[in-house]
Image (spheres, rainbow, N blue to C red):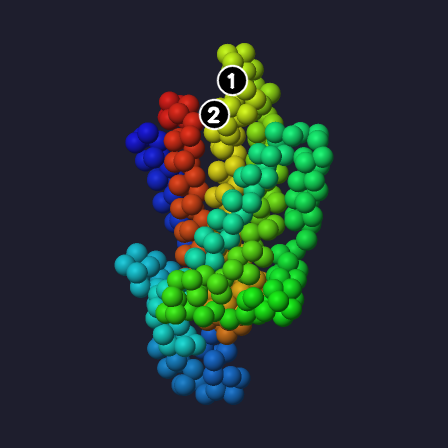
Amino acid sequence: MLRYALKRLISLVISLAIASVVIFAVIEVAPGDPASFMLGVNVQADTLAALRVELGLDVSKPRRYFNWVSGMLVGDFGTSYTYRTPVSQMIADRLWVSLPLALYALTLSTLIAFPAGIYAAARRGRPGDVAVMGATQLGIAVPNFWFAMMLVLVFAINLRWFNAGGFAGWDGGFWTGLHSLTLPAIALALPQAAILARVMRSALLDILGEDFMRTARAKGLSRRQALWRHGVRNALIPVLTIIGLQFSFLLAGSIIIEQVFYLPGLGRLVFQAISARDLIVVESVVMLLVFAVITVNFLVDLAYAAVDPRLRSRT
């Protein structure tokens, strides 16, 4: 198991190094100069040069890359060109919205998908299976921002159970903050739950047709007992992959939902930074999100080995 984990850890470090080069290169080749954007077209040359020195834009690109990476290794993401605030502080403030939102949505998605997928697999071809698959097809087809607007219309405007937007903050208590994130989390969770339920059903149906499942039934286990004791655990490997990818998506791809609900999360921060040509913020936030994606995949690989000992024996 240790050798397996070390190999995956080396892969993680190499992936992060490559990702940092790609992110820096792609963002730096974008047209336009942040200093010129901030000062306008009629700025004098000496003023522009002074601002470039202040922002650290006067050094070569390799040097800027080295400064950026070495700073991130010690927790220094640089200073925002626009707000003149440490980027690490801006990320920390927004992360306390985006991270709980992603975890909340992932929890809801899993709680919905697992029972639905298992129920559909256990009743293959019956009306219950058809109903679940129809609901999941609808969940996949409908965009999550449409779900968001419908949730606002029903639960915020008509029923007035939730606010239509904004974030109350965690200072008012855990449940107050969670209440503010409920509608956005549901809007994010429903399409992901539809995908996860279909994967769970498909994986479980494949397992139910295996020889060891027929052997378990021949030894006297009921269909329900064989399903829960042997089927569900062996079906978790492809499901874990989807859960890992979903968390990464929910953390990095919630920009539209954050715009709909006016949430001060990482998605809106990236959107605002792109609009203001605040490259250091864009680079740092994207790198952080890439780190989250790669780390989650690393943890999923370790979960594979825990669920399926055959993976450990092959390394």
Q: Residues within 10 Å of mark 1 (few under 14, many from 20)?
A: some
Residue name at image x 52 percent, y 13 percent: 220
Residue drawn at the location 65% of the way across and 68% of the way down: 158
Q: Amino acid at mark 2?
A: Arg
The quadrant of the image that shows the N terminus is: top left
Nearer-the-camera pick, 90 or 13: 90
Residue at point 63% right, 70% down? 157
Marks 1 and 2 close (CB-CB < 8 Å):
yes
Please identify the quadrant where the C terminus is shown. Answer: top left
Q: Nearer the viewer, residue 237 or 156?
A: 156
Q: Which residue is tagged 2?
A: 229
Numbered disc 2: secondary structure: helix
- On the question of residue 33 being in view, the answer is no
Q: Do we see residue 50 in this rendering?
A: yes
**Which residue bears the numbered disc 1?**
221
| 226 shown above or below 59 | above
Q: What x and y, as percent, mark residue 297? A: 44, 42
